[in-house]
Amino acid sequence: MAEGERTVRILVVQNDVDKGPGRVGDALVAAGAELDVRMATDDLPSVADYDGLLVLPGLNDPADDLPPVHRARAAITEALALDLPVLGLCLGGQLLAQATGGEAYRCQVEQGYHDVRSTAAAQEDALLAGVPATYSSFHAHAWAFTPPPGSTVLLENDVSVQAVRCGGRAWAFQCHPETPVSWADALARGIRGEHDGALLPETSGFFARHGVDPDRLEADARAADASAAVLAAGIGRGFAEACRR
């Protein structure tokens, strides 16, 4: 954080105990943000007491009629009504897209590391400026979202839209800029049946059922590490600044 910049408070809605803010959270803290992480399994505080909202991934689907999904969606709706910056990742991105007029739909299952393409608009985006034309990102989804009306597509691949900006202060990501190598390593252990408590069995099972190769996962995570770190740092700086404004 630059000298003289104020600390911003961000409400972080965590949907699963094993899916925290990761790299993006670290970058937000480095940029001067204070994170208040709350589980969607419990009642959430009003977003009005914060400068921004971050909604994380989860095993639930956006169509699930479950209290945690309703709580996360309500937090997004409140933040948008207050014109507060919102950042949604995977499930959070799907819920944000729905709240701004897009649709969530079942898509081809995409797991592990795969290439993502950036659009020309991404180069002028507050979170993604400088993103490579193509880079490898972690994926873990069987749902995707359509771009909401008036939104700007920032990232995409052959499976689905991977990131959009909704207006000037809300960003929905389908891919996972937050995933660190340590999380990918824990997932690889889980796929091999080495359940050491780092991840929920349901998380590892989601990947094991679809035949994700744990050796390739570990190798791909390391190959993508440098670019992923730079990308997450930019997202953290940009979102913290949006909250500060």
Image (spheres, rainbow, N blue to C red):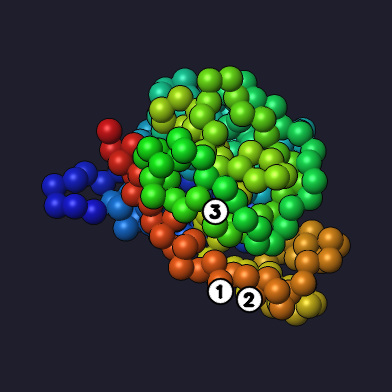
- As displayed, is residue 54 above or below residue 137? above
- Regarding mark 2 in the picture, which secondary structure is present there? helix
Along the polypeptide, which appears first: circle 1 or circle 3?
Answer: 3
Q: Which residue appears at 79% of the width and 59% of the height?
A: 206
Which tag is nearer the camera, tag 1 or tag 3? Answer: 3
Marks 1 & 3, CB-CB < 8 Å contact: no
For residue 134, the mark is: 3
Is 198 left or right of 60, judged from the image as shown?
left
Q: Which residue appears at 78% of the width and 67% of the height?
A: 212
Is 170 left or right of 65, judged from the image as shown?
left
Kindly report the distance in space between the C-alpha atoms of the residues bearing marks 1 and 3: 17 Å
Q: Name the image quarter holding the C terminus.
A: top left
Kindly report the distance in space between the C-alpha atoms of the residues bearing marks 1 and 2: 5 Å
Of residues 176 and 47, the one drawn nearer to the viewer in this rendering = 176
Along the polypeptide, which appears first: circle 3 or circle 2?
Answer: 3
Which tag is nearer the camera, tag 3 or tag 2? Answer: 3
**Res 140 visible:** yes
The amino acid type, in three-letter code, at marker 1 is Arg
The residue labelled by disc 2 is: 219
Task: Please count the marks in the image.
Answer: 3
For residue 222, the mark is: 1
Name the image quarter holding residue 126: top left
Marks 1 & 2, CB-CB < 8 Å contact: yes
- As displayed, is residue 137 above or below residue 198? above
Is 51 left or right of 118, judged from the image as shown?
left
Crowding around mark 1 (Cα neighbors within 10 Å: few <14, some 14 to 19, many 20+) is: some
Of residues 131 and 238, the one drawn nearer to the viewer in this rendering = 131
